[in-house]
Structure formats: structure tokens, C-alpha cells
Image (cartoon, rainbow, N blue to C red):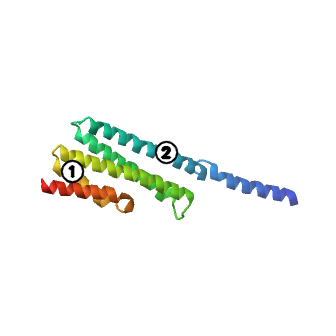
Amino acid sequence: MIKGREALSVLLGFLLLLSVGCVTPGGYANRWDDYYRDSAENLKTAYRLQQEQQQLISAESPDVEKIVQIANTASLTATNAQNWCDSWACSGRVSSTCIDCMGNFRSIAATAAQLTVNAANYCAKKGNKEKAKQLYREVITTYVGDAYRSYVRQAEFGLEDLKEK
């Protein structure tokens, strides 16, 4: 039979196991590591896509679809970042992790918006007006808020330019 201090030791040990359970697979610490790894990967991907698209545009690439595909991949990367924020980092609370997550998401989303505008401009330049209009409209309807106002304005100007031609 367990008495006094032994009972307290067993209880403390049990409580310690419960708290350590948070760092086991699927626990809080692993989610934290996954978040930071994925967040860093999403930021790297957005930067890489930006560089890749800029190189293709600068080289006057005939592969317009590749330039559009880069913008689409950036949009998917932004969605992935937003999903992390929604499902874990900001789930029901505002914390430093949530603020960090939303900052990374906004940065990636802004890159995606710029890449979409770039792709639309390139499509217009190469004579694919319908694809350019579609991409401009995508920017206008997808990127809402002050953080994306400049991209939306660029898309609106792009649409106006296509109407004049």
C-alpha cells in the first residue's frame, strides 16, 4: 500500500507524464516544430517562385503557361500557410504564434498576388488577353484588404488597359 510521500511522488510522476505527453508524437511540441518547418519552407518556396518567374519574364520566355503555373503554385503555397494559421497557430486564440503565422501568411500571399499580376501582365504582353483578364479578375476577387490594395489596383489598371486595346 502506498502512503504519504510515496502517494505524492506517484501523483507527481503521473502529472509529469501527462505534461510530458505534450511533447510526444502528435503533441504540442511536434506541432510547433512542424509549424516552423512548414512556415520556413513556405517562405522559401514563395521566394524561389518569385525568382524563377522573374528569370522567365526577363528572358522573354515563350512558355507563358509556366509563368502562370508559378503564380498558381504561389497561391497554393499561400493557402497552405493560411491553413496552418487557421488549424493550429490561431485556433481560437490570439498568441505570438498566431501573429507570427499571420505575418508569414500575408508575406506569402502578397508574393502570390504579385506573381499573379506579373503573369497577367505577361499574358497581355504576349497577346493572350483572355488569360490576362482571368488572372487580373482572380487578383481582384481573391486578395481583399489593405495589405493587397496595390496588387488589386495593378490588376484593375491591367483590365482597363485591355479594354482600351
| Residue located beneath label 2 in the image | 40
Quadrant the N terminus occupies: bottom right
Q: What's the amino acid at mark 1?
A: Ala
Q: Give left or right: position of 9 versus 162.
A: right
Q: Secondary structure at mark 1?
A: helix
Whether residue 132 is situated above or below residue 63 in the rendered picture: below
Q: Residue at x 20, y 50 (%)?
A: 131
Res 1 seen here: no
Q: Quadrant of residue 136?
A: bottom left
Q: Residue at x 48, y 48 (%)?
A: 39
Q: Give left or right: position of 35 versus 146.
A: right
Res 62 seen here: yes
Front position in the image: 163 or 134 = 163
Front position in the image: 146 or 75 = 146
- As drawn, the residue found furthest toward the left would be 165
Q: Residues within 10 Å of mark 1 (few under 14, many from 20)?
A: many
Q: What's the amino acid at mark 2?
A: Ala
